[in-house]
Image: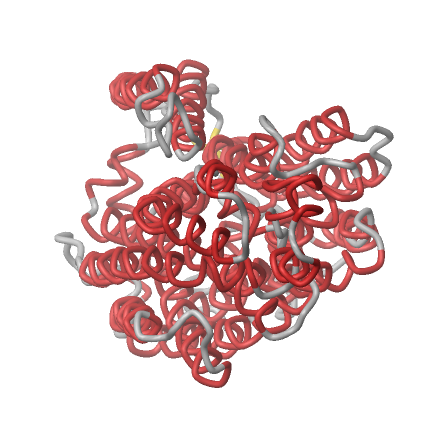
Amino acid sequence: MLPVDHPRYKWVALTNTTLGNLLATINSSIVLISLPAIFKGIEINPLAAGNVSYLLWMLMGYMLVTAVLVVTLGRLGDMYGRVKIYNAGFAIFTLVSIVLSVDPFTGGAGAIWLIGWRVVQAIGGAMLMANSAAIITDAFPPKQRGMALGVNIVSALAGSFIGLVAGGVLAEWDWRSVFWVNIPLGVVGAVWAYRSLHDTGVRRQAKIDWWGNATFAIGLTALLVGITYGIQPYGGHTQGWTNPWVLTGLIGGAIVLVIFGIIETKVAEPMFPLKLFRDPAFTGGNLANLLSSVARGGLQFMLIIWLQGIWLPLHGYSYESTPLWAGIYLVPLTIGFLVAGPVSGFLSDRFGPRPFAAGGLLVMAASFAGLLFVPGDFSYPVFAILIFINGLGGGLFSAPNTSLLMSTVPANMRGAASGMRATFMNAGQVLSIGVFFSLMVAGLSDSLPASLNAGLTAQGVPADVAAQAAQIPPVGTLFAAFLGYNPIAELLGSTVLGALPADNAATLTGLEFFPKLIADPFHDGLVVVFWMAIGMAVLGALASLIRTRKKPEAPDAPDQTAAAFIAHEAELSAELADAQPLAPATRIPEPLED
């Protein structure tokens, strides 16, 4: 075990927290790409009534829990030790992976087993995510912090895309293997973290803000659940925004979050220290983080639907193999993240983070603009270049953004700040599902019924049957494409197909009919989605340029001296700390330490 003042300790901390971040984020997307195999393995029909809810909760349960708990767990890290909370996260994550892989049920019971234990696993993932950036910030001096955070944060973002490839490969073998892969990595990471990491940050003796925790969890959960069910059909409408339960969740959740904000201004030890938002740079950085997360999360879902449901079947890939090949064809996006992230972190240490954070989002916006002109049946080299550029933009933005956020708060608030950053990122991903799917459903609802009706009748399907099949909710069509599933056979039934000429029936149930049918309506929806993503990326770039009004300059500036950095932290600490004494820290990193 290396002592905390050993020159190599900071690299041990970086390597271990990078593994923890990878494990937590890979697990989210590895399930995303493996859902066709998982649904087949537990014998769930994705188009049956009520089963869309299982799919949504398989997608969103993990992200929802991490979004709700990550601030609380970062705050607990400030109070009781970041490494302790981090180590517990590794242990929980690994044990639950074992439980998930032995799901003994099928049908709805099997789905509920997976959803429930994924929620528990998300607690472990939130422990890892909430404290990893704070551990690195404690271990590295300011002049190397951007590079270190760049490696760590880009590993988290790249993990979400690495999981797509890994999930596609593993799902071809056995759906349970997507959970098995976590076990050896989790065991190695847990033992290594327990033996190697030290709590080196400022620790506070404080009380848990129970009312703040409760109102934050209830409000954010209600809001995000309302968004989740808002994209499902209700009362003859293609979406459920008029559903009383959805409205209750949205309005009630917003009211509870307002109450949460009031509580946080009154209690002595707030879970969510709102005074941090008095620094305009911290506020702008979090806003940019949220907007980029919404844009990036929506892109991931849209690209998977585009590949699995349309492009790959049109190019002869079987529906069973589309998850694997979708992951492979998205590799340029991952490479872009991996190339740009560490480089932007290193350069931001020398020249400041704002130009890279803002520039990265503008590069992302340019890639979205390029995707506007790509047809449904695109040329892959053009597509690969555009998603590579998108990955470059995301990598350029992420590390400088995190460095800026973490360097504008005092040392004893880094766990809470890290949790806030992760909350905005995770909440943005959940919001992206509601925002982008709603826009896509709105685009599909205008043109899909007519396209489906015309396509079916052209193949000899009776007009009344075709008209009824054309009324499939657009969200059902989206999720069928998302799962690489051709719904035509189920929509028409064996009796109708059996009455058609053999060639017509083969065409309807073949690889190309359904993808060709939805390609144009899907592209109409994509145009709306990508314009929204462009707007969010540009607004995020502007937010990244906001500077603090405090003097001297924030410690992320390249010419910041050690004295100014310490003075800046002391100023914020005096403003944010309460009357309770601080527990003695094991170590506070020296600003100019190599």
The residue depicted at 32 percent of the width and 16 percent of the height is: 252
> Between 289 and 88, which is closer to the camera in this rendering?
289
The residue depicted at 27 percent of the width and 40 percent of the height is: 276
- The x, y position of residue 412, in whole percent, is 42, 41
Q: Is residue 406 above or below residue 538?
A: above
Q: Is residue 364 left or right of residue 575?
A: right
The residue depicted at 48 percent of the width and 76 percent of the height is: 336
- Assign the N terminus to one quadrant of the image: bottom right
> Between 287 and 582, which is closer to the camera in this rendering?
287
Colour scheme of the rendered structure: secondary structure
Can residue 581 be seen at all in this image of the molecule? no
Label count reads 0
Q: Is residue 325 above or below residue 66?
A: below
- The x, y position of residue 576, in whole percent, is 29, 34
Q: Residue at the bottom extreme?
A: 381
Q: Is residue 521 left or right of residue 184?
A: left
> Between 576 and 275, which is closer to the camera in this rendering?
275
The residue depicted at 47 percent of the width and 37 percent of the height is: 464
Can residue 569 be seen at all in this image of the molecule? yes
- The x, y position of residue 81, in whole percent, is 58, 37
> Between 585 and 27, which is closer to the camera in this rendering?
27
Q: Is residue 78 above or below residue 587?
A: above
- The x, y position of residue 484, in whole percent, is 62, 55
> In the picture, residue 527 is in which quadrant?
bottom left
